[in-house]
Image: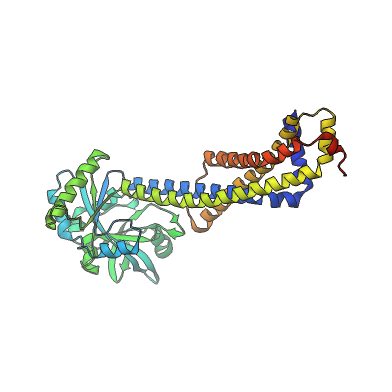
Amino acid sequence: MEFIEGFKIALQSLWANKLRSILTLLGVVIGVASVIMVVTLVNGAKQYVTTKLNSYGADIVTISKTPQTFLTIEEYLAFQKRKDIKMDDLQAIKEDCKSCVSVGALRNSAAGKIVYGTKSSTDTDVRGWTWTMPPMSNLNIVQGRSFTEAEDEHSSHVAIVGYDIVDNLLGQGDPLGKEIRVDGEPYTIIGVGERQGKTLGASQDNWVAVPLNAFIESYGSNVSLVIYVDAGGGGEAVERVSDELRTIMRGRRHLAAGVPDSFSIDTSATFQNILGQILNSFGAVVVAIAAISLVVGGIVIMNIMLVSVTERTREIGIRKALGARRNDIMLQFLVESATMSLFGGMLGVIGGIGVAKGITLLISFPSEVQLWSVLMGLFVATSVGIFFGVYPARKAAQLDPIQALRSEL
């Protein structure tokens, strides 16, 4: 009953002083909202990247001139000095890698111009793929078919397109068999990939894939390839294939023992680990800032509770005169401060989720609400209220009843 009474008194106090309550809880609301927003966005990003990496499979190994991720401009400039990955490297891996289940390669041109009739697109991602790449990237062809080995070897002018090309250029009707011009070269559409949606506001469906040899004929061979290898399994199989690929590439480049690799070998685990480190660092910084907001909010709650003790000195004296013990008075004020901060935590949770989902709607940044983060936010907010409410509660409990009754209203 004492707990319920304290809870009711706390709600009455919040309602009676609405503006003061809002200002009091603002620090807690901002702190909890920040934590919930960051956790929601970080979890969404991790889930999205994990899903995308899994679409390539845990058994895919890549060889490239530069690593897929780097953190400084100095690293980028150093990587650019490496030798390009060429078609003869691809051929050597096909012939010499005994553990490789499948080998493919790709090249990209990020600003291709696609023309169909009177319509055109000037920012389309043009991809040069070997015939083995669609299966290794788990690309589902929803209409038509993929490349054949013969089409790849003979530089056939056939193309697979994303749905942005179908929706924005081709219009109604069957897209298969239609001819588009890719940077001036004619290609016949033989397949359409499944819809991928948007990421960070950028469409993942604005692309055209053509056979790699045809791509090289059009754009030249002076750009490095990225070689993809299917290891046939995760774990030990990936490690075994990675070691074999490293041996082949170091042998081709005549690298002596102890000399660093002049190429990069990456797996899905590499991407996940690096991304995890970046997201965790980002999350830690924002959580630290949110912690400052919570401390400030707790101090404000303590000050307001001290004011409340002063305002209700006579009430405390009457309660003590009627038999209330020190513990009863202390419990009442602790429940009030905890209720205030819990209410602020609830507003923070709602606000944090709302901001995260708003970001998702605006720029398509993935977000995922997890129950543990909501419970954590409410627990932290309540703990802040209890911690900073102890001193005002002790001060109220230690008031002398006679002196309290003499207090003026």
Residue that appears at 84% across and 38% down: 403
The quadrant where residue 406 appears: top right
Q: Is residue 174 left or right of residue 372?
A: left
How are the colours assigned in the image?
rainbow
Is residue 81 among the parts visible in the rendering?
yes
- The residue closer to the viewer here, 397 or 35, is 397
Residue 99 x %, y %: 17, 43
Residue 86 x %, y %: 18, 61
Query: What is the number of callouts on the image?
Result: 0
- The residue closer to the viewer here, 28 or 320, is 320
Query: Quadrant of the image for the C terminus?
Result: top right
- The residue closer to the viewer here, 109 or 68, is 68
Q: Is residue 310 left or right of residue 192?
A: right
Query: Quadrant of the image for the N terminus?
Result: top right
Q: Relative to 351, does residue 164 appear above or below in the rendering?
A: below
- The residue closer to the viewer here, 56 or 215, is 56
The quadrant where residue 310 appears: top right
Residue 321 x %, y %: 85, 30
Residue 164 x %, y %: 41, 60
Residue that appears at 20% across and 45% down: 241
Is residue 351 among the parts visible in the rendering?
no
